[in-house]
Structure formats: structure tokens, C-alpha cells
Amino acid sequence: MTLSPASGSKPTEPPLRAASGSDAGSLIGLLILPCAILFALFFVLPIGLMAVMSVLTGNPVVEEDVTFTASHYARFAGDWYNWEVLWATLRIGLWTTVAALLIGYPIAHLMARVHSRALHAILLMAVLTPMLTGIVVRTFAWMTLLADNGVINQTLAALGWIESPLPLMYNEFGIVVGLTHIFIPYMVLTLTGVIGRIDSGLEQAAVSLGASPFRAFLEVTLPLSLPGIVAGSLLVFSLAISSYVTPILMGGFQVTTLPVMIYQQVSSSFNVSYAAALGMILLTISLILVAAYNRALVSVTRRK
């Protein structure tokens, strides 16, 4: 004789697990929803509007008979001056990234390996303090130093080392100097976290096996820090090629970059559609270069 389960018995285990999984999925969805809304409003929507404006003949809000066209992209491709501006923009971004990496890596390595908390705090404050000052203020400070009658040229002239001022500003050199000073904290902070996670005992083991400290750094620490180099370089490069304030102040309209050209199209020519096309071109080329750079360094990291 088989006894049937009581009517008030507890439900089986699988329905409980299914219900709890459903509740967890709903909770995760509710947590993600605000972030998704913010992402859509402040990233997807602006980029989407810029992409649409780049293929329109005008602004549909204030103009009539607006149609789709590819003339803005054809205009850019048909003028060699635009390609020179684009190359100058990418060149400035590249030199800024290289300078920030060469200066920031030793600082990041020192911050990650220093044992004194006081010294680490001092170095961290030295890196973060410039970020508390506005970009315009820091750019004007560099203009005071690098101008023809600035501190550097006046000092060198007073010492009798130069007869005419050195061209330190209103060129690509001055722009790179200003951008490097502005964006080097991003490189240092990114590298510090990656280098700090590398076991220093690996270098000591390499030295104990006969390698010099410099070779141990090249063979052990540098390859393991490539993810930080990739992340920091991509961040600095992306910020440098999209900068407007420093290039226009340090370049003095002697050096035209793509962000400066976009500003000119919006403020002077009132050609919003062509400015949107320039923005999409800069965004597309930047994404292609970033993807290629990231893929190349990742392949090097895997081989290492």
C-alpha cells in the first residue's frame, strides 16, 4: 500500500531554484537598466545623431527639403588639404602617446615598486595634482614658458646661448608638449595598477639565474606590463586626437587639427552636416587604428 503525499507538503526543489533564478535575472535587469539608459542617452544617441547629420544636406530642424547625400564625405576625400589635416591630427596623437609612455612608464614603475608609503603618497599627489587644475590654465602656463618672449627663450638669451627665440610654440612641438603634460596622469595611473600586480619575485628569480637587472626588466616586467601599455596608450591617443583647447591655443591656428576644423565649420561656416561628417571620419579612423594597435600588441603578448 502506497501512501500519497500530504496536501500541505512543501514544493519540490527544482521549482524553487527556477523561481530564484528568474528573480535574480529580474534583479540584474533592473540594476542594468539605469546604466543602459544613461549609455543610450549620452553615447548612442549623440553618435547616432551625428551619423545621421553627416549624410543630410542640411539641418532638418531649421531647413526645408533636406535630403540624404554623401557629398560631405566626397568633399573631404576630394581635397588633399583635408588629408594633411587628418595626418597632422594622427601624428600629434602618436607623438603625444610616445612621449607620455616614455615619461610615464618609469614613474609608474617607481610608484608600483616603492616600499615607502609616504613616498608613494608623494608620487601619487605629484601625478594627480595637475589634474585638479583646468586644461586652459595649464595650457596658458605652457604658453608662458614656451612663447618667443617666454621664460625659456628669455633665460637662454640672457645666458647668451641663443640670438633669436627658439620656435617652441605655434607648432606641433608645442602642442605635443602641452598634451603630454595634460594626459600623462592617465598613462601613469593605468600602468601603475598593472605593474603593481606583477610579482617582483619574478625579476629576482631572473637575476638569480644570471640575468642583469636591465635584462630581467626587458624579459619579465616589460612583457607582463604590455596590457597596461596597450590600455594607457589607447586612452592617451584617443584623448589627444580629439583635443581642441590645447591645439588651438598652442598652435595658434598655425597647426590645424581635425577637431579645430570641426569647430571652424560649426562656428564660422555654420555647416553642421560637414562638421558631423568630419567627426564621423575621425571616429572611424580612430576606431580602426585603435583596433589594429590593440590586436598587434595582444598578439605580441600571447607570443611572450
Image (tube, rainbow, N blue to C red):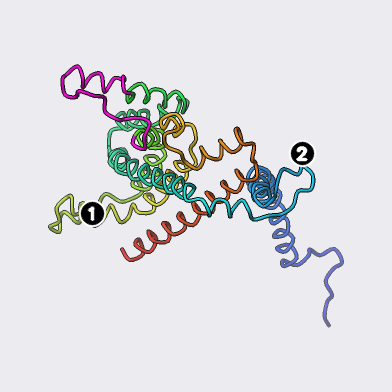
Question: In which quadrant is the N terminus drawn?
Answer: bottom right
Task: Look at 21% across and 22% down and name the residue there.
Answer: 156
Q: Farthest residue toward the front?
A: 79
- In the rendered image, the quadrant that contains the C terminus is bottom left
x and y percent of residue 210 in the render?
A: 12, 57
Please name the residue shown 36% across and 50% down the image: 229
Residue 170 falls inside the magenta stretch: yes
Q: State how far apart marks 2 and 1 are (Cα).
A: 60 Å
The answer to which of 277 and 101 lies nearer the viewer is: 277
Q: Quadrant of residue 175?
A: top left
Q: Amino acid at mark 1?
A: Leu
Q: Say whether residue 164 is left or right of residue 33.
A: left
Element carrying mark 2:
loop
Closest to the camera, between mark 2 and mark 1, is 2
Q: Which mark is residue 62?
A: 2
Residue 65 x %, y %: 79, 48
In this rendering, is residue 141 above or below 16? Answer: above
Judging by the rendered image, the residue that carries numbered circle 1 is 218
Q: Is residue 284 left or right of residue 95?
A: right
Query: Closer to the N terminus: mark 2 or mark 1?
Result: 2
- For the point 44% across and 34% down, the residue is 247
Instruction: Report the residue at 72% width, 67% height from top.
Output: 14
Find residue 50 and report its horizontal and vertical position in percent: 64, 47
